[in-house]
Amino acid sequence: MSLLSHLSRLCCSKCSSIPSSSTRLFCFAPQVGRSTGFLKSTLIKSKQAFRNVSVVETKRESYKLKNASWKDLKAILSLAGPYKWRIMLGISFLGISSSIFLFTPRVLGKLIDEWDETKQDKMDPNDKALLLARFFKENPIALAGVFMLGAIAIAARIYCMHTAGQLVINDLRKSVFNSVLRQDMAFFDKNKVGEIVSRLSTDALIVGYSVSMNLSDGARALITCFGSGGLMVYTSLAMCKVIFVVVPVIVGTFAVFGKLQRKYTLMMQEAVAGANQVATERLSSVRTVRMLVAERKELAAYSDKINEIWQISKKEGLAKGFMFGSFQFTGYLALSSILFYGSNLISQGLLTYGELSSFCLYAVLSAGSLSAMSGFYLELMKGLGASSRLFELKNREPRIPLEGGVQIGNVKDTIRFEHVAFGYADRDPLFHNISFDVPAGKITAVVGSSGSGKSTIASLLLRLYDPTSGRILVDGTDLKDIDPSYWRRHIGTVGQEPVLFSTTIKENIIYGSLEPENVTDAEIVSAADQSNADEFISRFPIKYDTKVGEHGSTLSGGQKQRIAIARALVNKPNILIMDEATSALDASSEYLVRIALNKLLANSKQTVMIIAHRLSTIKHADQIVVVDRGSVAESGSYDELIAIPDGIFRKLVEKQTFGFKNPESY
Ligand SMILES: Nc1ncnc2c1ncn2[C@@H]1O[C@H](COP(=O)(O)OP(=O)(O)OP(=O)(O)O)[C@@H](O)[C@H]1O
């Protein structure tokens, strides 16, 4: 009975140790960025960022084992390279525990026969197992001591392999995250953040497991299988006939129901991921759900997903039940056959009680190790499948590197867009010929109808994307030859919807500073003062140490915007890009932000690009560039452009001043 339960425990431990995809993490890009300090708040349109950010874990395909390639085997084994001594130590402990527990049944068999007076004369007095059995008969405490040693060796092996696995997982996660952080924006347009985070969490776990615990479990199964198989033959060749009949039945049962159970486990993981996706998406947009009174609808949607889980769970439970039931059935059948045939041999004097007991123990050990070996193979395949996806991310070279090139962080004369053409991947070309100059130390406003590509111009200037043809020249140097990080570091950006991180106001302001620890409090207050933020921050009880909540949820839109402006200013950037920094605000918030911006622009010696929606706000720009149908349709001062009869700018202004007769007077 206890042998059978030991056997089923072996199988259970195999099943339960498989990392479940229901443990996937859901994470938002700002948090990802914050945790490393790499992502700069230079995303021109936070709405674009959130398009990816709020995409949570999507339904993933089951592991496609057929895609696992053996060339990756070398690569995943090389991940364990730095920890080879730890793994070797684990394997040595495995050697100790396996030797003890493989030799034990034989010694126990001899111990049983030792009590049988009639068998004494037939025993080989030089048999090592017999000598040990006699020793343990006299010193039973020593036997307990040996078992204790075996148990300690097992514990040490598990510790070594578990920690080696975690170290591999840590390395993988760090290197993949590092590679992902370096990717260009086109990569993030195509890949969902939820999917990447899932790879970092689940796939790294599977790979780490497959080269650590799984490897040691596989080695243990192999040693046990061959060791106990050999010892069964050594114990009684005659009994092996029964084994040849019984073992395939046990392994076959396990294979059939095990496969079924694994299938349902994978279906379950997908269903749980689906339910999590619904829950996370809806909860992250709970304000919209509340305003649209959609609570019942969302509960129904979530209940449907839970029902899916329930349907699969019933099948999974049935498969599991049948597997363990059949396992008990075949196991008992096997043991009964061994005992029946064994007793027969005993009655003929061809076998001793001790030998039969040893044989039973070895049979159980080898059956357990056979099923463990099949599990090892599947886990290794899973590891290979998961590693190929991770290596793809780890080895991906971004088209726009993070660093490298001429270190230019200012413009002395002009930034020139020269016949720039550009289109987003899988979209029609957006620009076919954009040409205009941004003079140094002046304010240039870019205007155009919605979707004309104003924000894209700012993205190109930040080199978040490269033009498909044409060039952007900074005092004659192609932007492609300039160190991208150095360039971006000298540009202050305020996006349409400010992205704040769930930390203090102070940390939000200094986020993006090259040396945040060197930014003085006076500099922070000065930046906040310039952006009209100090006025409300100083009214908070703990002022700049106030936490702003997730995505700045405890602040008003205008307050968030003013903190974002302070963040853009604290680094004293040479170039400022303001992307519709006030369009999302109500009238009074806009007024406060506008005062801040006007104050800033009035004193500014910087080169400023304003992506403008509200045309009344750019009256004082030195130059206005009108983008229309992929090229620059008009450019000039406000007065020059408004004076063009039927001009595009004039029409844009007329649309915004609908109801006013004379747009010039607006
Ligand atoms: N990351 C992206 N991937 C694919 N297409 C994009 C992406 N970002 C913007 N677009 C598309 O490019 C076009 C120009 O977008 P952009 O945001 O530059 O326009 P805009 O003039 O700033 O618009 P608005 O005034 O409405 O903010 C739009 O059609 C938009 O759908």
Image (cartoon, rainbow, N blue to C red):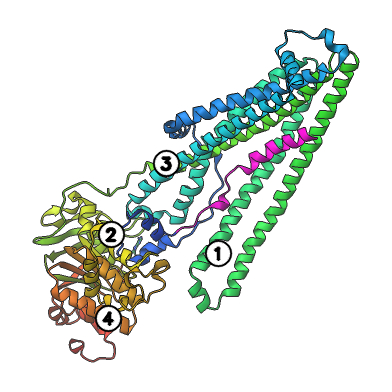
Q: Answer whether labels 4 and 1 touch (C-beta < 8 Å).
A: no
Whole-number angstrom distance, CA of label 3 to CA of label 2: 26 Å
Left or right: residue 533 compared with residue 474: right
Relative horizontal placement of residue 233, taking residue 157 as reference (left or right): right
CB under 8 Å between discs 1 and 2: no
- Neighbor class of circle 2 (other Cα within 10 Å; few <14, some 14-19, many 20+) is many
Query: The C terminus lies in which quarter of the figure?
Result: bottom left
How many angstroms separate mark 3 from mark 1 (CA)? 31 Å
Q: Quadrant of residue 123?
A: top right
Majority secondary structure in the magenta region: helix
Q: Amino acid at mark 2?
A: Gly
Q: Which mark is residue 592?
A: 4
- Residue 131 x/y as whole percent: 73, 13
Q: Which residue is mark 1?
A: 279
- CA gap, disc 3 and disc 4: 47 Å
What residue span does the magenta drawing correspond to? 1-27
The residue that disc 3 covers is 171
Residue 530 rendering spot, x and y as whole percentages: 21, 74
Report the mark closest to the observer, 3 or 1.
3
The amino acid on which the numbered mark 4 sits, given as a three-letter code, is Leu
Pointers 3 and 2 in contact (C-beta within 8 Å): no
**Percent x, y for residue 49?**
37, 62
Whether residue 149 can be seen here = yes
Q: Secondary structure at mark 3?
A: helix
- Asked if residue 385 shows in the view, the reply is no
